[in-house]
Amino acid sequence: MGNRFQVKDRFADGAQYIDGQLRVGTSGRSHTVVDPATGEEVLTYELASTADVDEAVAAAKRAFPAWSGATPGERSDALHRLAAVLAEQAEDFAYAESLQCGKPIKLSTEFDVPGTIDNTAFFAGAARHLQGQAAAEYSGDHTSYVRREAIGVVGSIAPWNYPLQMAAWKILPAIAAGNTIVLKPAELTPLTSLMFAQAAKDAGLPDGVINIVTGAGRDAGEHLVGHPDVVMTSFTGSTAVGKRVAEIATATVKRLHLELGGKAPFLVFDDADLEAAAHGAVAASLINTGQDCTAATRAYVQRPLHDAFVARVAELMETVRLGDPFAPGTDLGPLVSHAQRDRVAGFVERARGYATVVTGGEVPGGELADGAYYRPTLISGAAQDSEVVQSEIFGPVLVVLPFDSDDEGIALANDTPYGLAASAWSRDVYRAGRATREIKAGCVWVNDHIPIISEMPHGGYKASGFGKDMSAYSFEEYTQVKHVMYDNTAVPAKDWHRTIFGDR
């Protein structure tokens, strides 16, 4: 990366973005963003207080009438300008994302940043297509049509694994629909969310439309979700925290969108292309160091292919290059923190008591010892009800289990509380088609695993939550549907009145 900006200088005025300005948080407590590749400090900032959240919500509330009253074309133009600004600043965004998360720079440069620019361009177009049902005389005596209206101030919470993309997934459909937003990013990774808000100002979006409060979940987060002027909450994170968010939102009768945990099955039938499945499994389990709620975590392989699959995946995992996230040859960076690395290592160490660690399962030493690194890990021989099969590990760990019949494979794929994503690998279109119908997940890939596109929705079944990010379907979350009905008869005494008073 050539032109690396200085993070401390960039955020010298604070890590809260309220009403178009960076501010210092007023909680009296600070937090340090740490480079997980080195353990070194990136930025220490003051966390947001509940008073800061109140100011951000007030700013969003003030901005709402003008922004929601803008024409779809005006909002579309603003988002097109934002996409252009993001493209101009792409190098800085990629650098900051890799610095705070430990992502390999090739992932930030080729996935996170261009994906966010594409999301922005998509919603720039989608802003002009907030459509309702066409006008018609459904009753015979009335003309009905449907309006889609902005709902107000949205209070959203984004996770640390994809800080830039998750900020965009929360912000873009909300503001494209005419809402204003207060976003709380994870304390670990606030940099690119703040930069996104600043880029929006550079693009000419009005102050107050996008606000960022960086604070602790139990303080700033819970206050935001429960705020009386916030009409909707969108949360991405763990299922456990999602339940708490739901409790708070329900108490104040808010609209709620939850994208929660995942434990994606990777279902390999015995007619699959073994080489394709093995390569797909390595890529899909190790993306973002496995810190991806749609990552392949449970590979179910029909018994005739099982042993060859395990051997080939192990062989490929051993070629994965751990290293400096900013080195162009690095494939796998550290986990987001040492605490997360130790959590992942704990799962693997406990699994040694009931399963086989085929490869990996260790913290590297040498020049990587100071970072939160963990080697790509393959586990076999675990039982379906074991911890590594049922619980979300959120690290570079893949568990492989055999199955016999197609019925058994699909049943095992569905046998967790989660239902966010899955994949099926087969050359047989009917076999694959059955899997796409019967696996209970919000996305099922066939002969691939991980790709996402702006035009298609992302969201889960079961304990993985409800509601959709991306795509035009996301407007179901961020708009109020209003039925408007006109009488066409001009008759004072309608025939239906007689069911209430009088006679025919």
Image: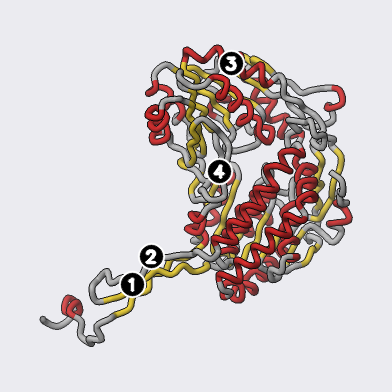
Q: Position of residue 437 (x, y in %)?
A: 39, 36
**Amino acid carrying mark 2 in the image:** Gln
Pick whichever of labels 3 and 1 is earlier in the sequence.
1
| Real-space CA distance between mark 4 and mark 1, rounded to the nearest whole angstrom | 37 Å
Amino acid at the residue labelled 3 = Val
Work out how far the residue at label 4 is from the one at label 2, CA to CA, in angstroms.
Answer: 31 Å
Cα separation between marks 2 and 1 = 9 Å
For marks 4 and 1, give the one nearer the viewer: 1
325 horizontally vs 484: left or right:
right
Label for residue 144?
A: 1
In this orientation, does residue 226 appear? no
Marks 2 and 1: CB-CB under 8 Å? yes
Q: Is residue 500 above or below residue 259?
A: below
Look at the numbered disc 3 and give the secondary structure of its residue. Answer: helix
Q: Dot 3 corresponds to which residue?
A: 310
First-in-chain label (4 vs 1) = 1
**Which of the labelled discs sits on residue 133, or is there none?**
2
Residue type at the position of mark 1: Ser
Q: Residues within 10 Å of mark 4 (few under 14, many from 20)?
A: many
Image position, residue 261 (x, y; %) = 56, 39
Q: Residue at x 86, y 48 (%)?
A: 4
